[in-house]
Amino acid sequence: RRAMAGLDTAVWDLRGKVAGKPVCALLGGTPGLIRAYASSMKRDITPEDEAARLCALRDRDGFTAFKWRVGAECGRDVDEWTGRTEAVIPVVSRALGDVEKLVDANSGFSPARAIAVGRMLEDHGIGHYEEPCPYWEYAQTAEVRAALSLDVTGGEQDCEFATWARMFDLRSVDI
């Protein structure tokens, strides 16, 4: 399915180039500005270095929203190193100040651990929690969503409407 989605994207891009129009116009929309957030794909960085890196992006490029990683990818409650999640959340959040803050767990936690981390996120003004549980475990993510007040997000790994419909039916995610 992912290969098909990649091919579909390439075909839409080609159709837009042939027509001399942006893809959004082919779909009935109009082009416009899209807000971007600065993000970190790193876990092998100290919380202090992560904060400095993201603050430099804020100061140099004017970003007003930031996403960084916690946990270990598909980590089953294992962190990149012991205590990193608990350290990186407050350090980066404080350093960035009054901006939109997003955290990505990359399917790293069980529901109990995800809820505990989510409460820490809420305490530090973070409003977006991406893939707290394994992305294919929709009921686990729904349990986390029901326990927290911040937005729980997911679906980027999926490329079929039936999968998204199941996520909606289970109320697995807010976004």
Image (cartoon, rainbow, N blue to C red):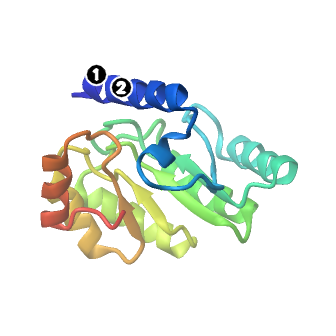
Q: In the image shown, does 111 or 139 lie closer to the viewer?
A: 139
Q: CA distance from mark 2 to mark 1?
A: 5 Å
Amino acid beneath label 2? Gly
For the question of whether residue 32 can be seen, the reply is yes
For residue 78, side relative to residue 102 (left or right): left
The answer to whether the residue labelled 2 contacts the one labelled 1, judged by CB atoms less than 8 Å apart, is yes
Amino acid beneath label 1? Ala
Mark 2 Cα within 10 Å, few/some/many (few <14, many 20+)?
A: few
For the N terminus, the image quarter is: top left
For residue 16, side relative to residue 143 (left or right): right
Looking at the image, the residue that sits furthest to the right is: 60
Q: In the image shown, does 130 or 32 lie closer to the viewer?
A: 32
**Residue 126, image x and y in percent?**
54, 67
For residue 108, side relative to residue 34 (left or right): left
For residue 168, side relative to residue 109 (left or right): left
The dot on residue 6 is: 2
**Residue 77, image x and y in percent?**
31, 45
Q: Say what secondary structure mark 1 lies in.
A: helix
Q: Say what secondary structure mark 2 lies in.
A: helix
Q: Residue at x 26, y 25 (%)?
A: 4
| Residue that mark 1 sits on | 3
**Residue 133, image x and y in percent?**
27, 50
The dot on residue 55 is: none
